[in-house]
């Protein structure tokens, strides 16, 4: 069974969707395929977002905003939108969630931390849901009697 694929989408792919993708990638440890994109991508990830993610030991400094493509949406099992409204394409048969979160653009780190922490809470709940329906990898059996 293939790992489920999650696509996080916001307008600029410079803040919320980058944090969500990095957090899910970190917590999932390979159990979920993660992508992020923006309907109107920025030129770089918000430096304050890079800083608040580094506080958790997660490095997003090498990430870059990516344009939302039809292919990315088609490949995803779950599409999570964060304020992109009508700019996010909707395809039948896809699961969509809309996370209402403040945009960290222009905010100082102390105002981004609560947004990051709320995203982390939602990402952990999503991961628990996605992985609870999937069988755990089989543990090797011992040859000894019990």
Image: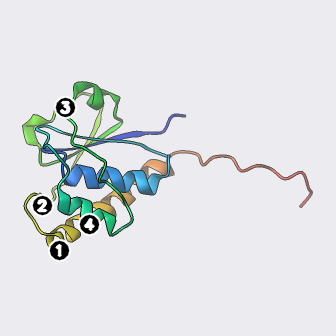
Q: Which residue is mark 4?
A: 52
Q: CA distance from mark 1 to mark 3?
A: 34 Å
Return the residue at label 3.
90
Label 4 secondary element = helix
Query: x, y percentage for residue 145?
Result: 92, 57
Looking at the rendered structure, the secondary structure element under dot 2 is: loop
Q: Earlier in the sequence, mark 4 or mark 1?
A: 4
Can you say whether 21 is above or below 122 in the image?
above
Real-space Cα distance between discs 2 and 1?
A: 13 Å
Q: Nearer the viewer, residue 90 or 107?
A: 107
Residue 102, disc: 2
Q: In the image, what residue occupies the spot 18% across and 67% down?
A: 112
- Name the side, left or right, on which 55 lies relative to 137: left
Residue assigned mark 1:
110
Res. 128 visible in picture: no
Label 2 Cα crowd, 10 Å radius (few <14 / some 14-19 / many 20+): some
Side of 1 relative to 100 (left or right): right
Asked if disc 3 and disc 2 are in contact, CB closer than 8 Å, the reply is no
The mark closer to the camera, 1 or 3, is 1
Q: What's the CA distance linking mark 3 and mark 2?
A: 22 Å
Q: Earlier in the sequence, mark 4 or mark 3?
A: 4
In the picture, the quarter occupied by the C terminus is bottom right
Viewer-nearest of labels 4 and 2?
A: 4
């Amino acid at each position: 069974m293939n790992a489920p694929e999650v696509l996080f989408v916001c307008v600029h792919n410079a803040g919320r969707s980058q944090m969500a993708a990095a957090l899910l990638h970190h917590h999932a440890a390979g159990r979920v395929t993660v992508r992020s994109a923006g309907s109107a991508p920025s030129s770089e990830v918000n430096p304050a977002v890079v800083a608040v993610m580094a506080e958790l030991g997660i490095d997003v400094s090498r990430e870059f905003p990516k344009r939302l493509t039809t292919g990315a949406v088609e490949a995803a099992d779950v599409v999570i939108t964060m304020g992109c409204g009508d700019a996010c394409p909707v395809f039948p048969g896809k699961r969509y969630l809309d996370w209402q979160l403040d945009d960290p653009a222009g905010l100082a780190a102390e105002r981004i931390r609560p947004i990051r922490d709320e995203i982390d809470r939602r990402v952990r709940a999503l991961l628990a849901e996605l992985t609870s329906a999937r069988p755990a990898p089989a543990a090797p059996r011992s040859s000894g009697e019990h």
